[in-house]
Image (cartoon, rainbow, N blue to C red):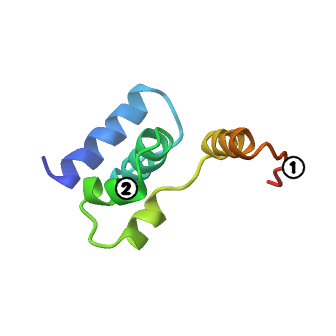
Amino acid sequence: LSTNRVRIDLITICKLAETSKTYSYHSGRHSFASLITLEAGVPMETICKMLGHKDVKMTQRYARVTQKKLFEDMDKFIAATGKDFILAL
């Protein structure tokens, strides 16, 4: 399966879904890294290997912390320390 075939299929899917938003092969990698793995608690080093990166810095460009993950981690921190903080977004 070539990246060009994936690109063509994504265009077709967007048309069928009647969305004006476009998606790319790389947006799928970003979603996988952020929404599917990082948000599920998979360590960054593991995501790095899953994406085939040699350096975790590259993975950090793909895997962005979502608000959901941020709030979950803050709740864990508060539960572990007994300290409450205001989370500035």
Going from N to C along the chain, the mark reached first, 2 or 1, is 2
Q: Is residue 52 above or below residue 68?
A: below
Splitting the image into 4 quarters, where does residue 36 fall? top left
Q: Residues within 10 Å of mark 1 (few under 14, many from 20)?
A: few
Which residue is label 2 attached to? 26
Q: CA distance from mark 2 to mark 1?
A: 34 Å
Q: State the image coordinates of residue 59 (x, y, percent, origin top left).
A: 40, 63
Q: Quadrant of the C terminus?
A: bottom right
Q: Secondary structure at mark 1?
A: loop
Residue under the point 38% across and 51% down? 24
What amino acid is labelled 2 in the image? His
Which residue is label 1 attached to? 86
Q: Nearer the viewer, residue 86 or 55?
A: 86
Splitting the image into 4 quarters, where does residue 31 fall? top left
Q: Is residue 79 above or below residue 48?
A: above
Q: Residues within 10 Å of mark 2 (few under 14, many from 20)?
A: few
Splitting the image into 4 quarters, where does residue 79 fall? top right
